[in-house]
Image: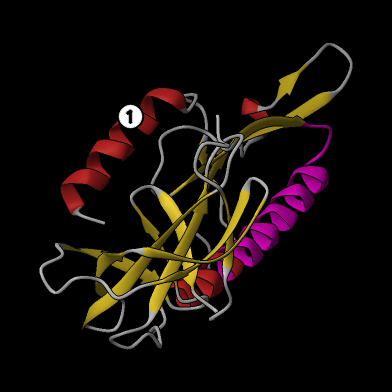
Amino acid sequence: MHTKQQKTIEAKRALVIPRHYTRLPVEGETDLVIYGVTTPAQFYSDGKDTVYRAICFTRKSFRPRWHYTFKSEAARQSYITRDVAARTEHQATVHARRAKRYQPHTLVVGDVLVSSWGYDQTNVDFYEVRRCVGKTEVDVAKAPSVVVSESVGAERVIPGRAPDTAGTWRVRVNGESNSATIDRNYARQWNGQPCHQTAWGWGH
């Protein structure tokens, strides 16, 4: 993170951390930063028991993840250990998903993406891949829908060829599924089968 940005976060965080808290050591590779009481003079008594407090942040945030009170130092350390392990596992999962999402797609020029959308009716839009840009983006053009069969209130459609003069726009492709968000709608790679849509005049 940029040094200036990190300093701003740390300055805001300092306003939240109680003055008598000091940073606690945390084992393992983690982005968690934890502060708490460390000496008997700082421990808080609720009139019956001595309690131990701690507050936790991520390295990039000044808002606490949690700020808890514990009945013993052992209980506090046990919770911190579990939280660090859970955070590490969560981040590993997020990184793995992100790596899949941004892996190179396998679309080629001429492939078609299809979007099925609508409320109280089903609309189908087709998009023809005109150009592959790098490993994660493509330029697409809107392709016409061709009706191949009809029934009461419904049609089955396949894509026609997009006109050579059709405008194109660039979209990022999820390499794991060869899908993209086009015009705010989810579009997947067309599987070659006719798609169902609501017939003209039957929608709401």
Residue shown at 22%/83% (left/top)? 134
Q: Main secondary structure of the magenta part?
A: helix
193 versus 168 height, above or below: below
Give residue 149's position: percent from left, percent from top.
59, 66
Q: Which residue is mark 1?
A: 12
Quick one: 47 or 120, which is closer to the camera? 120
In the image, 65: left or right of 129?
right
Give residue 159's position: percent from left, percent from top.
41, 71
108 versus 89 height, above or below: below
Magenta-drawn segment: 70-92
Location of residue 1 (image quadrant): bottom left
Residue 28 is at least partly visible in this image: no
Residue shown at 26%/69% (left/top)? 140
The question of residue 34 being in magenta is answered with no
Q: Quadrant of the C terminus?
A: top right
Q: Which amino acid type is shown beneath numbered disc 1?
A: Lys
